[in-house]
Image: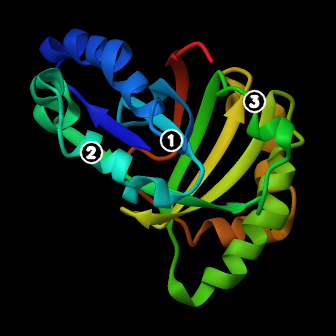
Amino acid sequence: MVWADVPADKEAEFNRWYNEEHLAERLAIPGFLNGARYEAVKGGPKHLAVYELESPAVLDSATYKKVSDNPTPWTKRSGPQAVATTFIRNVYSMIHPRTVTPPVAESGMAPALQLGRMDVPAEVDREWNEWYSTIYVPNYEKVPGVIRGRRYRAVAGTPTYLTFYEFEHPKVSETPEWNRQRDAVPVSEAMRKHMRHAQGSPGVYVKTFELAR
């Protein structure tokens, strides 16, 4: 997951670089399964690139390192490390569900996402994770417009946890059905108080670019 804020006078070239060079360059690397770009309609940072990987080990492969260690001239001019005012690059491993079915693995990137980036105190970590994976996410998955929910733990970057809801449209979390699930069970109010969200979280994003599969 790569988030960035970019000055207005750099945005057009940044988007062109991402769409015409960078995304295809990354998806050509073995182990990169899918990828798409999104923009925030709520929260932030504004620009988001999501890459689905076979595992975090892909980023240690010789092929990936050859590409990442030898940036193109365009990358040096217009990549986020050159122009972004905010640049967050986190790597995650999925913790809920433990596995995905073949149809899910082969599905495209969702039209919209809601992302929560958070930490919790160590003393409630086990209880909080059990609640989140067995109660909170499954309840939200009942809401019309929710495709599915996933949870991830950071293996590089902070904060520790990422909640990843895939939506049919960006207004799903503004519906009465979504709001009813927020406190559908008494434990949810208590557990939510432990969350320490990163700035801009939760954010809602809409897909802006995806290569033909």
Is 77 placed left or right of 23 in the picture? left
Residue 11 in picture, x, y percent from top left: 23, 15
Residue 66's mark?
2
Mark 2 element type:
helix
In front of the other: 153 or 168: 153
User: As displayed, is residue 159 above or below residue 43?
Assistant: below
The mark total stands at: 3
Mark 3 element type:
loop
User: As displayed, is residue 147 above or below residue 55?
Assistant: above
Is 27 placed left or right of 186 in the picture? left
Dot 1 crowding, Cα within 10 Å, few <14, some 14–19, many 20+: few
The answer to whether any part of residue 151 appears in the image is yes
For marks 2 and 1 on the same chain, the one whose residue lies earlier in the sequence: 1
Is 133 placed left or right of 38 in the picture? right
State the separation of the CA atoms marked 3 and 1.
18 Å
Task: Give the residue drawn at x 86%, y 51%.
Answer: 139
Rendered image coloring scheme:
rainbow
Kindly identify which residue carries mark 1: 30
State the separation of the CA atoms marked 2 and 1.
12 Å
Q: Are marks 3 and 1 in contact (CB under 8 Å)?
A: no
Residue 151's mark?
none
Residue 187 in picture, x, y percent from top left: 79, 71
Kindly identify which residue carries mark 3: 107
For marks 3 and 1 on the same chain, the one whose residue lies earlier in the sequence: 1
For marks 3 and 2 on the same chain, the one whose residue lies earlier in the sequence: 2
Residue 158 in picture, x, y percent from top left: 38, 63
Residue 144 in picture, x, y percent from top left: 86, 29
User: As displayed, is residue 210 above or below residue 132?
Assistant: above
State the separation of the CA atoms marked 3 and 2.
29 Å
Task: Give the residue drawn at x 78%, y 58%.
Answer: 99
Quarter of the rendering containing residue 137 = bottom right
